[in-house]
Image (spheres, grey):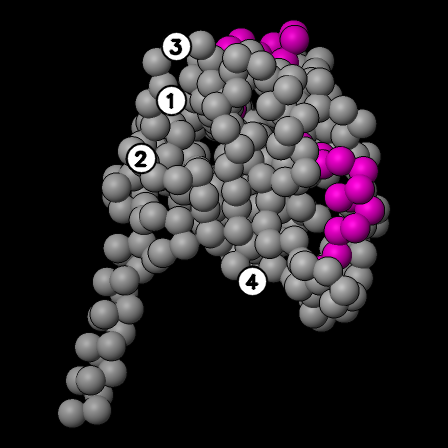
Amino acid sequence: MTPYYEHAGITIYHGDCRDVLADTVKSEDVVITDPPYDAQTHAGARTLGKEARASASTGKRRIVSSAVIEMGFDSLPTVDYTAELWRWATRWCVVFCSVEMLGAYRDVAGAAWVRGGFWRRSDGAPQITGDRPGQPGEGLAIMHRAGKKRWNRGGHHAFWECGVERDNRQHPTQKPERLMEILVSDFSDRGEIILDPFMGSGTTLAAAKRLGRLCIGVELEERYCEIAARRLGQEALPLSFGDDDLSAPGASSGRQEQEKDDDKNDDKTVAR
């Protein structure tokens, strides 16, 4: 299959990932992906506050306030396929899902199951009705092919805290760039190949490029392939800092902290 986009170790395929993976893609080092969730989660997805949102069906932006999010794609009837994505990885397979789906992923993954992780949306929407606890975040089904396990966060918990994507949202379920950079850093090494079979607008690919990884993305909707290709074309070359500069979940990076200190020093200089 001819790639939709290919440059500097980043490749995009337009098509159904089941066909692309079967015909074109071999087992890669790591899978990190965000497939559709279950029907109940899709039906209840909402956004908080007034925001300009792109309609999943028309692409036109409009102002919404506490509105149901238009997904523009079907929910997963079963995890039978997505819980087997570890077969396309030689090491880790990390799959976003609703918290309620983690048990299903565990049951299907079998011996490949490691544990469920959790992304806490630090600025996510509260329960609008106020009659029950709100959903604080989303699950991550963490799997690994048989063999010795190794990741880059030592004994850290499978817990990540990060705000949702608001400034550059081009997909209804787009994950924040900061979160994807941390996951890429935690589960892969520089020079490894990451596979994202449900790449959406290409956030995993952009994170991989910045951190010196190679990446293959597959997307069913051509308009998202185009968005991802444009996005990657605008990306700068991989940054020179190492993965150690990526801080623990929920914290600012050392580089960001230094920038804050510099800003404070500048303010003090002005005050003097």
**Which of the image's four quarters has the N terminus?**
top right
- The image's mark for residue 123 is 4
Residue contact at pointers 2 and 1, CB within 8 angstroms: no
Span shown in magenta: 21-47
Q: Say which quarter of the image contains residue 2.
A: top right
Q: Tell how many labels.
A: 4
**Which circle's residue, 3 or 4, is located before the other in the chain?**
4
User: Label 4 is placed on what type of residue?
Assistant: Asp
Residue designated by label 2 = 155
Disc 3 and disc 4: Cα gap in Å?
37 Å
Disc 3 and disc 1: Cα gap in Å?
18 Å
Q: Would you say 272 lies left or right of 161 here? A: left
**Which circle's residue, 1 or 4, is located before the other in the chain?**
4
Disc 2 and disc 4: Cα gap in Å?
26 Å
For disc 1, the neighbor class at 10 Å (few under 14, some 14 to 19, many from 20) is some
Disc 2 and disc 1: Cα gap in Å?
22 Å
